[in-house]
Image (cartoon, rainbow, N blue to C red):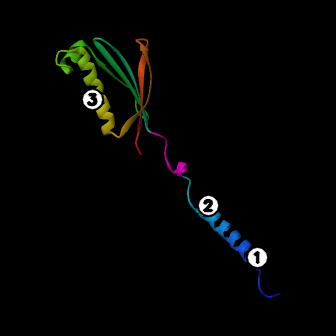
Amino acid sequence: MAGRPSRNGIFVAMKKLFFLGACLVALASSPVLAQTGGADIVVVKVRESYSYMELNIARAGSKPEKRVFKSKELKELGDGNEPSGIAEATRRLLADLAQQGYSLTSTYGGNSDFNPITLVFTKRQ
């Protein structure tokens, strides 16, 4: 049996060939993280009181936007009721961002007027 390779030798050769093929496949494919761009994030600071609401909106690549709703506007939005107007203004902002493909991913703050609520939205890929 000098001319025939042993079973153990064939097994080792196949194992090496399989490992080499797996390495080549791994090198040929690009990492997923390298293919994705940076996350598209929108940060919204919400400051509100009974008759006033201020939204400060920051997006990548554009100037920050400030939307202010005073008592008269809030009453119009809420059919004469300011708290309902605040809820409606917030609903419109959330609907607008959802339509653009953003989803709420984080919130923090909001325990006083000096610490506004912060909403963080990221765009779905």
Compute the Cα span from label 3 to label 1: 71 Å
Tell me which label, 1 or 2, sits earlier in the chain.
1
Identify the residue under disc 3: 92
Compute the Cα span from label 2 to label 3: 47 Å
Identity, as a three-letter code, of the amino acid under mark 1 = Gly
- The x, y position of residue 16, in whole percent, is 71, 69
- The x, y position of residue 32, in whole percent, is 53, 51
Residue closer to the observer: 17 or 89 = 17
Crowd around label 3: few <14 · some 14–19 · many ≥20 (10 Å): few
Residue, far right = 2
Say if mark 1 contacts mark 2, CB within 8 Å. no
- The x, y position of residue 88, in whole percent, is 25, 24
Q: Which label is found at residue 117?
A: none
Q: What residue is shown at x 77% (from left), y 82% (from top)?
A: 5
Which quadrant of the figure has residue 68? Answer: top left
- Numbered range of the magenta stretch: 32-39
Identify the residue under disc 1: 9
Crowd around label 1: few <14 · some 14–19 · many ≥20 (10 Å): few
- The N terminus: image quadrant: bottom right
Identity, as a three-letter code, of the amino acid under mark 2 = Leu
Total labels drawn: 3
Task: Please identify, in this view, whether the residue under mark 1 or under mark 2 is nearer the observer.
Answer: 1
Identify the residue under disc 2: 27
Asked if 103 appears above or below 67 in the picture, the reply is below
Q: Is residue 31 magenta?
A: no
Residue closer to the observer: 80 or 19 = 19
- The x, y position of residue 91, in whole percent, is 28, 28
Element at badge 1? Answer: helix
